């Protein structure tokens, strides 16, 4: 079972940020809002979705995400989800806006990038992060946009837009 975490504070945003993930996952999944995270033992993978540019309350609510990081589950944070991962692991969050299709540089091969040849990704964020301790950067623009530590991936771009292979690869790890 896969857990999809909704981090938006407006239920209207679910169609834009959660539904595309649902369509890629296709398998058995459950959606939970980040304020209702508990009983995570039955999930094999957790995907923390992104949200709108001005919807940033999740950055003030990092404590709600503790159950995710206490689990041994495989985790993928997308955009806001990536910012949550970075902040949880002590990285500084900074103002840095990127919007639109941008080229990335792959720095290191990884199973999440298997058969991924596309170098252009969709970014839509107001914040970036420094590389958290013990994480490695797998791809970047001018900043890290795909990082990893053990079973945790943080993807600052939106792989649900033209880069579904990354989510598919994550789900097969």
Image (cartoon, helix red, strand yellow):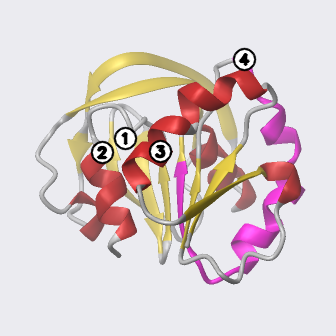
The disc, 3 or 2, on the residue closer to the chain's N-terminal end is: 3
The stretch drawn in magenta includes residue 90: no
Residue 94, located in which quarter of the rendered image?
top right
Q: CA distance from mark 3 to mark 4?
A: 21 Å
Which mark lies nearer to you, 3 or 4? Answer: 3
The image position of residue 15, as x and y in percent, is 58, 28
Element type where label 4 sits in the image: loop
The image position of residue 44, as x and y in percent, is 54, 78
Element type where label 3 sits in the image: helix
The correct choice, above or below, for 28 with respect to 16 in the image is below
Q: CA distance from mark 2 to mark 4?
A: 25 Å
- Which residue in the protein does label 4 denote? 54
Residue occupying the point 38% across, 48% down: 24
- Which residue in the protein does label 2 denote? 164
- Tell me the tag on residue 100: none
Asked if the residue at tag 2 contacts the one at tag 1, i.e. Cβ–Cβ closer than 8 Å, the answer is: yes
Which mark lies nearer to you, 2 or 4? Answer: 2
The stretch of residues the image draws in magenta is: 54-77
- Tell me the tag on residue 21: 3
The image position of residue 137, as x and y in percent, is 39, 56
The disc, 3 or 4, on the residue closer to the chain's N-terminal end is: 3
Residue occupying the point 35% across, 31% down: 161
- Image side of residue 64 versus residue 137, left or right: right
- Image side of residue 171 versus residue 162, left or right: right
The image position of residue 73, as x and y in percent, is 59, 78
- Which residue in the protein does label 1 denote? 159
- Image side of residue 33 versus residue 150, left or right: right
The disc, 1 or 2, on the residue closer to the chain's N-terminal end is: 1
Residue 25, located in which quarter of the rendered image?
bottom left
Q: CA distance from mark 1 to mark 2?
A: 5 Å
């Amino acid at each position: 079972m896969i857990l999809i975490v909704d981090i938006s504070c407006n239920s209207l945003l679910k169609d834009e940020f959660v539904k595309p993930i649902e369509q890629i996952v296709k398998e058995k999944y459950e959606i939970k809002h980040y304020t209702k995270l508990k009983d995570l033992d039955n999930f094999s993978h957790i995907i923390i979705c992104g949200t709108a540019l001005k919807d940033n309350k999740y950055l003030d609510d990092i404590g709600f995400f503790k159950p995710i990081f206490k689990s041994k589950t495989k985790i993928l944070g997308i955009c806001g989800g990536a910012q949550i991962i970075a902040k949880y692991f002590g990285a500084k969050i900074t103002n840095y806006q990127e919007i639109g299709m941008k080229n990335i540089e792959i720095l290191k091969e990884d199973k999440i990038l298997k058969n991924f040849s596309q170098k252009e990704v969709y970014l839509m964020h107001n914040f970036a992060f420094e590389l958290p301790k013990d994480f490695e950067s797998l791809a970047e623009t001018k900043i890290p946009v795909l990082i990893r530590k053990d079973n945790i991936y943080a993807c600052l771009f939106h792989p649900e837009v033209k880069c579904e292979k990354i989510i598919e690869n994550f789900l097969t790890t």
